[in-house]
Image (cartoon, rainbow, N blue to C red):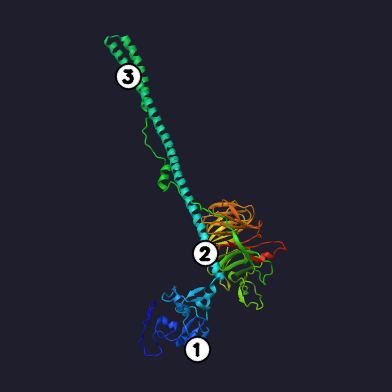
Amino acid sequence: MAVPGKKATKQFTLSTTSICSEEDLKVYCQPCDRDGPRLPAHGYCTNCSEHLCETCFTFHRRHTLSRHHTLQDKTSMPQTMSPANPGQLDSFTKPCPKHNIEMIKFYCHDHSALICSVCVTLEHSATSCKVNYIPDISGETINSKEYQNILKAIIDLTERSDTTLKDKKKCFAESNKSLKDVLTDIKKFRTRINRRIDELERQVVEAAKVIQNDNSKNLTEIETVYGDLSKSLKSFSDDIKHFNTSKKANDLFIELKHAEQMIKHYDQSVAKLSESEVKTYTFQPNKAISSLFDKEKSIGILKGTALNLHTKSRQYSHKEKICIKTSRDNKSCLIAGMTFLAPDLLIITDYENIAIKIIDLSEKSVLVRQCLRLDNWNLTSSSKHEPSFQLRQNYLPLPGSKPWDVTLVSQNEIAVTLPLRQTIQFVSVSRKSLTKKHNLKVDGNCFGINCHKDRMVVSFSRPGKIQILLIDGTVLLTIRGENIFKNPLYITSNDNCIYVSDSEMKTVTKLNWHGEVKGKHVCTETPLGLSMTEDSSVFVCYSTNMIIEEILGDCTKGRVVVKDTRRSNALYWSTETCTLYTSTRSYKENDTEDNNYIHILKFL
């Protein structure tokens, strides 16, 4: 057998006379030529554009993937090897990711997968999948619409990448500029602290100097008193001694009596001076200041605010709409919530018709509809005479309550708010079914809901509040207050923040996951549906104004991205496809037809 990638030897030591040297054969079996000795051609496959030996010819008739190919026998086959034919399959150079020694040669339409022959045998058999041999269908791609769309998508993505790079450069430049200001602010703050500490130090030093001056003054006064006393006592002593020596009895008598009175007076003065208090001092630091520096680990923190620099405003290139009304809908639709299950599956809640619907966006033009009726959530057969629509729809009535908002909990599970029942209903979903699971009773009329990782954020109306819950219903945090929320109807979130629209306060409020308000955008109209973008800005639609606005992540300002649209109730932004999906809403009896459509806006 020939080694792949090397030319087979010209002579083979085999017993059969049907094997010839490559010099003798002008038309030979191409599959065998790649892996072994060159064998004479017995026929030709027009689909594969290959000559086949007798064994390959027979196998070609029987194999699932090639049994419908057009074969020519030895008499009708081409008698020369076309320059395009030799080594055609050698153009397969992409190895299979699962089977590295095999090349990708087939395409499975059901799984949108490029596969090898081993994959076909093990995972994509003809009984379960629609599989095509790539050469059979690849010719259709030359200058095809798919080719043009992919090129356009590449150009669009390249432009968006260039724009994003420019924006990020501006962001980093702005960030570095802000950090220069931060360093200046740190020095200013430290200077202010030093100045205050110096001021407090001067106060204590001045107090100590005042005491020192008082001590000096008091000591001087005491020394003066003691000096005068000492002089007076010495004078009395001298006089008494003199009168006693000179035997002047009268003078001595008078002086003794006088001295006696003076001794009593001086004795009181000495006693008074001895009782006067003199203190020693120690420095006792301010406990508040001392403990502050002991406990604090930083002089301050660096607080970041997301930048939202755009070289140009978002603009949509085209729009289309999809009808979502079914024959089972008794009323005009009112789409209150929407989310994505997969890139081509949009889940919506129809408030007026009390239903959940799944729309297959990839098959808008395919007349396929599958309806499931669930009476008390038990499966019953659907009508065989159900008319077709330009989309595939699955339909799940929710008896007894109108569904408002919906969020994706996992790849095959959603959660729907039922405000009138004060319940969150969990539903299992797939491309062909909707099945009720457990429900979660909550303590209020729950409207907006958004699940992020293992946490749900739910809004409640009158009284207005927000709750952060685990999937099992454990309440982690409740945020309430008339100055914050009154009638919050929609919520969206990501790793860093939560946005809430309040129709009564006419605000879009930004919170962190600790419940702290980080920003608030005051709207001129009544805000409803929300959907966050990749850069933490948020789209918002209004019930009374025919616009869709994009509010920057810091809530400082908003800009109109869609004008003159129908009033909208719910929307969803797909970052992957740069597409905005919106519902429409009208209460006028003669103007409700457009409520039955989802509008799709493709942005540049």
Q: Return the x and y of residue 28 as percentages of the image width and height.
A: 44, 84
**For the C terminus, which image quadrant?**
bottom right
Q: Which mark is residue 230?
A: 3
**For the N terminus, which image quadrant?**
bottom left
What residue sits right under mark 1 in the picture?
75
Q: Count how many numbered circles sit on residues in the image.
A: 3
As helix, strand or loop, the secondary structure at mark 3 comes to: helix
Is residue 390 left or right of 184 when viewed as pictured?
A: right
Q: Distance from label 1 to label 2 (Cα)?
A: 49 Å
As helix, strand or loop, the secondary structure at mark 2 comes to: helix
Looking at the picture, tell me which residue is in the foreground, 196 or 598: 598
What residue sits right under mark 2 in the picture?
154
Q: Earlier along the polypeptide chain: callout 1 or callout 2?
A: 1
Q: Nearer the viewer, mark 3 or mark 1?
A: 1
Q: Residue at 32% across / 19% down in the picture?
A: 230
Toward the left, the furthest residue is 245
Picture layout, residue 430 above or below residue 551: below
Picture layout, residue 360 above or below residue 52: above
Q: Is residue 131 visible?
A: yes
Q: Is residue 63 visible?
A: no
Is residue 251 left or right of 323 when viewed as pictured?
A: left
As helix, strand or loop, the secondary structure at mark 1 comes to: loop
What crowding class fits label 3: few (fewer than 14 Cα within 10 Å), some (14-19), or many (20 or more)?
A: few
Looking at the picture, tell me which residue is in the foreground, 464 or 103: 103
Q: Earlier along the polypeptide chain: callout 2 or callout 3?
A: 2
Is residue 454 left or right of 582 when viewed as pictured?
A: left
Residue 220, image quadrant: top left
Say if mark 2 contacts mark 3, CB within 8 Å.
no
Q: Return the x and y of residue 478 as percentages of the image width and height.
A: 55, 57
What crowding class fits label 2: few (fewer than 14 Cα within 10 Å), some (14-19), or many (20 or more)?
A: few
Q: Distance from label 3 to label 1 (Cα)?
A: 155 Å
